[in-house]
Amino acid sequence: MNKQNEKNDIKIGVAGAGSWGTALAALLADKGFQVDLWTFEEEVRRQIIEKRENEIYLPGFKLNEKLTPSCDLNSVIAGKAMILIVVPSHVMREVTSQMAGRIPPESIVVSASKGIENVTLKTISGIISETLPEVESGRFAVLSGPSFAREVAAGSATAVTAASKNIDTALFVQHVFASPTFRVYTSEDVIGVELGGSVKNVIAIAAGVIDGLGLGLNTRAALITRGLAEIRRMGVKLGADSKTFAGLAGVGDLVLTCTGPLSRNYTVGKKIGEGKKPREIVSEMRMVAEGVKTAQSLFNLSNQLGIEMPISHEIYNILYNDASPRESLKRLMTRDLKHEFNAY
């Protein structure tokens, strides 16, 4: 990338004005890029124009004038060198289908969304390969890692991974996003980075349940470690590099989401552990806890592939079969005894 001309020449479209989409759009605008941000809600568009703030999803942060909100998806992606998609996984197919045939031929498409689609059991890259066949795999990248939106917006030092099958695309994304407070590493393991970011949300619900039940740090440490084993098991089965799960998009994101109160998935689990019903918790949330839907996808995918994922299955049973959290814990602790690493 030509550093001298990058801010003048690269126009960026961001689809999705939730907390993460807004934080990333703000990061890019603060770097000097011209950023168009697609907002689904007219209320959010109006707030950003009038108050330079997304009061619904990212309150308390003033947004750079280089960030322009719009409810017109076509205008947001038109003529852009890079299109960043940050919408919930359950609407990814609908939103990207609307983009079909409108992506500029040389655009780099980046996903910062996390999840596995319920019906097809596909990750985001799988969805996009179907809805946007004109976007070759070499022009697609994923961005993932331990990164709460509010901390990124506040300028807290953060490190993430940009993955693409084409290393030049990963390098392009790395340089576009990198800043003194936002360090970006590269990878070519797209599926590994995607799975790390998706499955950890289910494990984070389990971590919240543990804390909601009032159990100790021993329990949480065991859960995170064995949760990582489940993520690695699924990833390797689907062709990921096992080293990815020792990195930022693996253990890094898992630890953050399982221990940070800013995590929506952890919060859902904590409320379940305290006695609230999952349906009641979800109905009270305006923002999406991806792990709730991903738990269903993961349950079905692991069964389809014959992969043992006991923690993920117990979270599915708690969320969808009204299982008792304490009974789920008992089942996990009294499973057949095994060699630790053979259990991978």
Image (spheres, grey):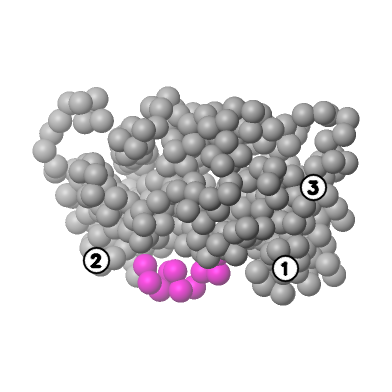
Residue type, label 2: Asn
Q: Quadrant of residue 320?
A: bottom left
| Residue occupying image coordinates x 42% and y 42% | 195
| Residue occupying image coordinates x 39% and y 32% | 240
16 over 146 or under it: above or below:
below
Q: Confirm or deny contact between disc 3 and disc 2 (CB under 8 A).
A: no
Local crowd size for mark 2, using a 10 Å CA cut-off: few (<14), some (14–19), many (≥20): few
Local crowd size for mark 1, using a 10 Å CA cut-off: few (<14), some (14–19), many (≥20): few
Q: Quadrant of residue 38?
A: bottom right
Q: Which mark is residue 321?
A: 2
| Residue occupying image coordinates x 74% and y 45% | 81
- How many numbered marks are there? 3
Q: Is residue 263 visible?
A: no
| Residue occupying image coordinates x 71% and y 38% | 177
- Residue 158 forms part of the magenta stretch: no
| SS class, disc 2 | loop
| SS class, disc 3 | strand
Rendered location of residue 312, percent (x, y): 30, 49
Residue type, label 3: Lys
What residue is disc 3 on? 11
Quarter occupied by the N terminus: top right
Rendered location of residue 18, percent (x, y): 63, 60
| Magenta segment boundaries in residue numbering | 278-288
Q: Quick one: label 1 or label 3, which is nearer the N terminus? A: 3
Relative horizontal placement of residue 303, taking residue 297 as reference (left or right): left
Q: Which mark is residue 72?
A: 1
Query: Rounded to the nearest whole Å, what is the CA distance between mark 3 and mark 2?
Result: 47 Å
Q: Confirm or deny contact between disc 1 and disc 3 (CB under 8 A).
A: no
Relative horizontal placement of residue 307, taking residue 66 as reference (left or right): left
